[in-house]
Image: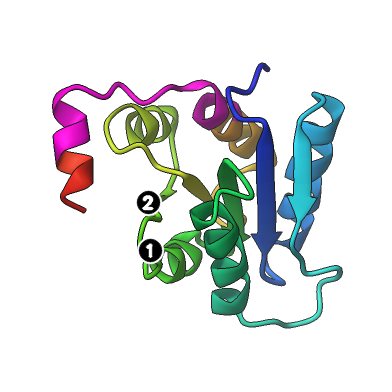
Amino acid sequence: MKSIFKKICIASDHAGFQLKELVKNYLISKNVSVIDLGPSNENSVDYPDFAKKVSRRVKSKKSDLGILVCGSGTGMAISANKIKGIRAAVCYNLKSTRLSRLHNDANIIALGSRLTSKKMSLKLLSTFVQTKFEGGRHLRRVKKI
């Protein structure tokens, strides 16, 4: 896997903790710089707090891309998308993942640990970090978001 992004940040809630750790270690093994914004264990936490941490870091350009993991991916994506400039996509198959980058220039991938296998999650992540935004007619639309 060759990421087009240099700095990636990641966070989860308690339901996504195990998958977050797997994804983080996978990226590190591929020599990708990863900033873990928490949590540090599986104790119950509120996912909006962690979605905001990642979103603010991506918005301020301290990270090029964000990864959020919760049970379904949906709660994290909804929370992240409240921050102006964030385009978080719940990715659940290869086509949705590829199109989220190609057409929507998504800057955060949201994964559902209870809905997506570990193996598929790593495939989705690889697709996300290797896919460039197509621009063109899609740029006009992204600017309207």
Three-letter amino acid code at the position of disc 2: Arg
Mark 1 surroundings: few (<14), some (14-19) or many (≥20) residues within 10 A? some
Image location (x, y in percent) of residue 50: 63, 71
Provide the residue designation for mark 2: 87
Q: Earlier in the sequence, mark 1 or mark 2?
A: 1
- Looking at this view, is 2 or 44 the one in front? 2
> Residue 24 falls in which quadrant of the image?
top right
Is residue 112 in sight in this rendering? no
Viewed as shown, does residue 90 lie left or right of 12? left
As drawn, 100 above or below 66:
above
> Residue 120 falls in which quadrant of the image?
top right
Q: CA distance from mark 1 to mark 2?
A: 6 Å
Range shown magenta: 126-140
Query: Residue 59 lies in magenta, yes or no?
Result: no
Image location (x, y in percent) of residue 95: 36, 28
Which mark is drawn over residue 81?
A: 1
Query: Residue 135 lies in magenta, yes or no?
Result: yes
Whether the residues at callouts 1 and 2 have beta carbons within 8 Å, the answer is: yes
